Image (cartoon, rainbow, N blue to C red):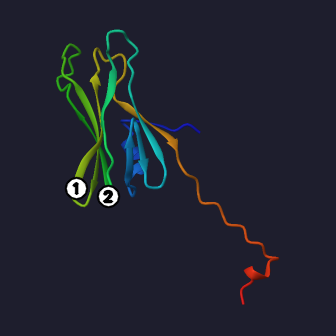
Amino acid sequence: MTEMIGHYQEDEIKSLFIGRKVVKAEGSDLTLDDGTVLQIIPNEGGCSCGAGDYYLDNISKFDNVITNVEVKDFGGENGDWWDEATHTYQIFVYSGGISTSIADIKGDDGNGYYGTGFEIYVKYRPGPPKAELINIFDKTNWEE
């Protein structure tokens, strides 16, 4: 099952990160300590004018257990499409008074018709551990 989480789905983003550590950050992928791999996918506006085009500017690991997550949105305050100011989304994680941005996504909404922000694609999520099978006919497995 494909799992895509939009930048506006803060509760779902929190459920991915809280209680985990980001142990690896490479390319557009974040790897969590349980083996989950998340890909940050910036919005592609699809217009030759560049409206709605975003790019991943920074990605970082965070080697502390995450206790809170916040998606912050900076820029484009006046909402005018002709405003050339860069728009930035940041995924901030918190732990014991420490906070940092683990992903910075920058771009321009342009006229507003071609989308904004980013999505998180869950590339891999480990399942529950498999039960170990025990041969009950082998006397070495019998409890005494």
Q: Mark 1: which amino acid? A: Ile
Q: Is residue 3 left or right of residue 77?
A: right
Q: Residue at x 39, y 58 (%)?
A: 19
Where, by quadrant of the figure, is residue 63 drawn? bottom left
Give coordinates of residue 138: x percent, y percent. Answer: 80, 77
Q: Which residue is mark 2?
A: 64
Tell me if residue 14 can be seen: no
Q: Secondary structure at mark 2?
A: loop
Q: Mark 2: which amino acid? A: Asn
Disc 1 packing (10 Å; few <14; some 14–19; many ≥20)? few
Cα gap from disc 2 to disc 1, whole angstroms? 9 Å
Q: Which mark is residue 80?
A: none
Question: Which residue is more in the foreground, 78 or 106?
Answer: 106
Q: Which mark is residue 98?
A: 1
Q: Secondary structure at mark 1?
A: strand
Where, by quadrant of the figure, is residue 71 drawn? top left
Q: Are marks 2 and 1 in contact (CB under 8 Å)?
A: yes
Quick one: quadrant of the N terminus?
top right
Q: Residue at x 27, y 53 (%)?
A: 94
Give coordinates of residue 49: x percent, y percent. Answer: 32, 9
Question: Which residue is more in the foreground, 87 or 28?
Answer: 28
Q: Residue at x 28, y 38 (%)?
A: 90
Disc 2 packing (10 Å; few <14; some 14–19; many ≥20)? some
Give coordinates of residue 135: x percent, y percent. Answer: 77, 72
- 61, above or below 47, in the image: below
- 76, above or below 144, in the image: above
- 111, above or below 107, in the image: above
